[in-house]
Image: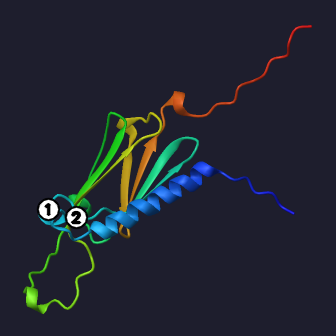
Amino acid sequence: MNLVRWTPFQDMTLLQNQMNRLFDNALHGWPAETTGSGGWAPPADIYETDSELLVTADVPGVDPKRIDVRVENGVLTIRGERRLERKFEKENFHRVERSYGPFARSFTLSMPVEPDKVHASYKDGVLTISLPKTEHAKPRRIEIGAAAA
């Protein structure tokens, strides 16, 4: 028999993300969404290693030159725009399911990072951002000294 550690906060985060997506999808296309204020948001993953935070965001069809990545006051912001390049008459569309227009995502960083060393790359429609941790944010092993008798 194997024991599996239950982590309630991880389950709560998963539930929160699923609820956010549910409401985002339900509200997509409402009049407030069509004002050009950002009708879509690329999904993103955030992963932590000993030395950095890694953020990956799915932005297929977005020109990397149209993506702006900033780190200010402990917040990572990704902005960009996916444009519909071809001009079509509305009557010719059979279905439009992909989202177009500007987007913006902001993430409060859980630890201090080195903003001057942030690196972003783009490959196959995936934006990857590497945010190196500051030295005092990196984990370190603490030696335990022997108590005097």
Q: Secondary structure at mark 1?
A: loop
Query: Type of residue at label 2?
Result: Gly
Query: Horizontal placement of 36 versus 103: left or right?
Result: left
Where 14 sits versus 61, above or below? Answer: above
User: Can residue 14 be seen at all in this image of the molecule?
Assistant: yes
Q: Is residue 54 above or below residue 38?
A: above
Q: Residues within 10 Å of mark 2 (few under 14, many from 20)?
A: many
Report x, y in % for residue 7.
Answer: 65, 51
What residue would you read off at disc 2? 39
What residue is disc 1 on?
36
Name the image quarter holding the C terminus: top right
Please rate how many residues cluster around mark 1, counting C-alpha atoms within 10 Å: few if below 14, some from 14 to 19, many from 20.
Answer: few
Q: Are marks 2 and 1 in contact (CB under 8 Å)?
A: yes
On the question of residue 59 being in view, the answer is no
Q: Relative to 52, is 36 on the left or the right?
A: left
C-alpha span from label 2 to label 1: 7 Å
Q: Disc 1 residue type?
A: Gly
Given residues 104 and 62, the one toward you in this image is 104
Determine the image quadrant of residue 79: bottom left
Provide residue 62's location: percent of width, then percent of height.
Answer: 26, 67
- SS type, badge 2: loop
Residue at 35% x, 68% y: name it. 125
Q: Relative to 28, is 147 above or below?
A: above
Query: What number is the disc on residue 119?
Result: none
